[in-house]
């Protein structure tokens, strides 16, 4: 899927950054080994939580994306200000996930229209 290539996703991350969302969290596109090529995995480092968090397509071939929070072995306690920062991070992660989904859906629709014109 070309819309899941590392190059495309890095361009989308840069495009998203230009939209003016606060960049409290770090975002990076991960190279993932898979038999079907690029699978689209984007890691997010949250400011006030060490929870492993990533954004990925829900299934191969689908333009739908999801945010995954891996299980934690220990509890997380945060002061009110830390929770506010985490909340802001999660709002950006949500917007980024929606952005990837919109870009993927647009790509799929364009490909379908092009195939229909052939």
Image (tube, rainbow, N blue to C red):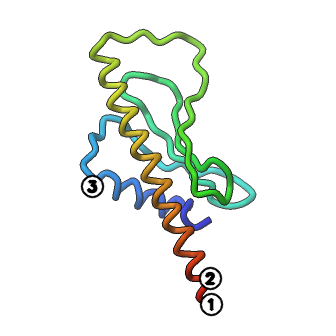
Which disc number belongs to residue 18?
3
- The quarter holding residue 90 reads top left
Q: CA distance from mark 3 to mark 1?
A: 35 Å
Find residue 3 and report its horizontal and vertical position in percent: 54, 64
**Circle 1 Cα neighbour tier, 10 Å, few/some/many (<14 / 14–19 / ≥20):** few
Q: Is residue 35 left or right of residue 78?
A: right
**Circle 3 Cα neighbour tier, 10 Å, few/some/many (<14 / 14–19 / ≥20):** few
As helix, strand or loop, the secondary structure at mark 1 comes to loop
- The quarter holding residue 36 reads bottom right
Q: Residue at x 27, y 40 (%)?
A: 22
Q: Residue at x 53, y 30 (%)?
A: 52
Find residue 110 and report its horizontal and vertical position in percent: 52, 74
Which disc number belongs to residue 115?
2
Which disc number belongs to residue 67?
none
- Compared to residue 34, the image places residue 3 above or below, namely below
Look at the image and tell me in which quarter the N terminus lies.
bottom right
Q: Earlier in the sequence, mark 2 or mark 3?
A: 3
Q: Is residue 26 left or right of residue 107?
A: left
Q: CA distance from mark 2 to mark 1?
A: 5 Å
Q: Residue at x 59, y 28 (%)?
A: 70
Q: Nearer the viewer, mark 3 or mark 1?
A: 1
Q: Residue at x 43, y 34 (%)?
A: 45
- Compared to residue 97, the image places residue 49 above or below, namely above
Find residue 81 and report its horizontal and vertical position in percent: 27, 16
As helix, strand or loop, the secondary structure at mark 2 comes to helix
Q: Nearer the viewer, residue 29 or 118?
A: 118
Q: Earlier in the sequence, mark 3 or mark 1?
A: 3
Whether label 2 touches label 1, CB < 8 Å: yes
The residue where tag 1 is placed is 118
Look at the image and tell me in which quarter the C terminus lies.
bottom right
Q: Is residue 10 left or right of residue 34?
A: left
- Compared to residue 75, the image places residue 102 above or below, namely below
């Amino acid at each position: 899927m070309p819309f899941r290539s590392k190059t495309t996703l890095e361009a989308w991350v840069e495009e998203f950054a230009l939209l003016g969302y606060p960049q409290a969290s770090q975002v990076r596109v991960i190279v993932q080994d898979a038999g079907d090529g690029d699978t689209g995995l984007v890691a997010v480092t949250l400011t006030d939580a060490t929870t492993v968090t990533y954004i990925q397509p829900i299934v191969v071939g689908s333009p739908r994306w999801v945010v995954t929070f891996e299980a934690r072995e220990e509890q997380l306690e945060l002061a009110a200000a830390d929770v506010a920062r985490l909340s802001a991070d999660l709002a950006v992660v949500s917007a980024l996930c929606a952005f990837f989904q919109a870009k993927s859906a647009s790509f799929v629709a364009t490909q379908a229209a092009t195939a229909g014109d052939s």
